[in-house]
Image (cartoon, rainbow, N blue to C red):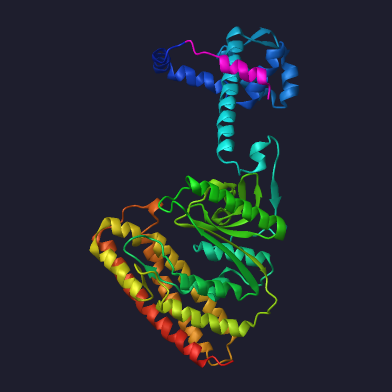
Amino acid sequence: MDLKIIEKAKELKNEMSLEESSQVLSNSFNDITNLLKAIASPKRLMVLNYLLQQPRNFSFLLNKLRIKRTTLVHHLDFLIETNLIDREDWGRYCITDIGLKFIKAITSTYQNIIFEQQEEHQQIINQYNQWPQFYRASGVIKENLVSNEAKYQSGWNSYISATSGVLISLGVPHDYIYIGGRTGYCFIVNATHLISASILSKNAWQEIYKGTESFGWKMNLWKKKRKYSCAWQLENEDYDLGLDVFNQVAKIIDDYNTPVVLLGVHGSGFAIINGYQNDSYLVSTYYHIEGREEIPIRFDQLRLINKFTYFYFTKNQEKENPEFEDKKSIKRAIEFAKGIHFSQSDFTSGPQAYDTWIDVLSSGKKDHIEKIGNNILGQFDYDSKSIATEYLERLYYKYKENQQAQFLKDASQCYKKAMMELEPFTQMFPHPKQRNNNLTLESRNNGVKILKKVKNYQIDAIENLEKAYEKWKL
């Protein structure tokens, strides 16, 4: 950057007082807006730049801008109307004195802004001396992308969606449904009076990790508690920890050429990290499912409740025994569905969770209903039931000739009925971002009736799962 220009920008003084500037703005909102529109187009700025050098004719500008004749005419007319350029004679244009002063003002202001940003940037570097080299050396770009890029899979459970995407990219011949069923996550039901998301105990996560590793890949898990866990956004020492996590993930990608699953992307969810670019993660998230463009996530933009968490997979030499792991997944499903020792102290799990959910809807307390009787928990439970339905149906067909098959099918049907009941529930209590305040007594009573039926189907499903496990012979 030209230091002389920067110094010149620093010397610029605003001759108007703040009061005078405010008065001009108040009297000229439309005119100033129209003037700013004149430079809001890259093509018009290019025209002004060419005319700064010397007057130009129409054919020269048309050749340089490579646009349609009618489009160039529109741009030139706009600049003439705002008195920034003038037509000397037919087909020849020049910049006006006002245009010249205007360009000098905006370029000087721009350079002044750049200078202040550089000063702020240098202060940050001095304060955080462990920041990456690309912050210190202008133009240095640090970037890497794994060769087996993983894609986020469909579903509301971000752990299963991200984990499935990575395992599939590593060659695991199973989809989101099968991985969700094998880990047992889809059989969990948790409820609380406090928040709208299910929180699992350490024991529950350990079981889920075991189910995840049953596909023959070892999970390498890293966790560290935040210093300021009361805030969603990173602050103070958590910035440094966030940078340390970023550097660790980048090193894993460099050393192992494998995707990483990271917590805290787009609102505390799990996401796939396929690489990095400068200070940002290159991610695959639910944006992929929605057909939206993925955007890099800067290392300090994570949103975390209390701890940093990431994991990646390395190959386990022990080969998978499919039937043994399938039977084990049923045991895991029973324990999760019944809520045995897998919930935090402030939560209810298993069929009893529906009682808590029902109490919230029955209470009529709007703040409680919006936190728990809504589409976050409702949609999550609906999605879980749909996975459980299909997973158990697949096991039924896989072991159709065995004694446990019919009970697997019956359990699948129970979850299917529960899922069908939950579908209108998700419409009655929409996502908070789409809330229509549908908290009438009638809607709440209908919600209670639905949850009571779902609870009964849950109990019936557990009974069939227990019979299937009992009959399963290896």
Whether residue 445 is visible here, answered yes or no, is no
Residues rendered magenta in the picture: 1-15
Residue at 71%, 58% (x, y): give it: 255
Question: For this rendering, which residue is in front, 256 or 322?
Answer: 256
Residue at 49%, 70% (x, y): give it: 205
Q: Say if the magenta span includes residue 252.
A: no
Height in image: 195 above or below 50? Answer: below
Q: Is residue 52 left or right of residue 288?
A: right
The secondary structure that most of the magenta stretch takes on is helix
Provide residue 300's location: percent of width, then percent of height: 53, 46
Height in image: 409 above or below 299? Answer: below
Provide residue 32's location: percent of width, then percent of height: 48, 18
Q: Say if the magenta span includes residue 10.
A: yes
Question: For this rendering, which residue is in front, 75 or 68?
Answer: 75
On-image quarter of the N terminus:
top right
Provide residue 335's location: percent of width, then percent of height: 45, 80
Question: For this rendering, which residue is in front, 47 or 259?
Answer: 259
Residue at 42%, 74% (x, y): give it: 342
> Which quarter of the figure has residue 421?
bottom left
Provide residue 49's location: percent of width, then percent of height: 67, 18
Whether residue 322 is visible here, answered yes or no, is yes
On-image quarter of the C terminus:
bottom right
Height in image: 299 above or below 100? Answer: below
Count of numbered marks: 0
Q: Is residue 438 left or right of residue 221?
A: left
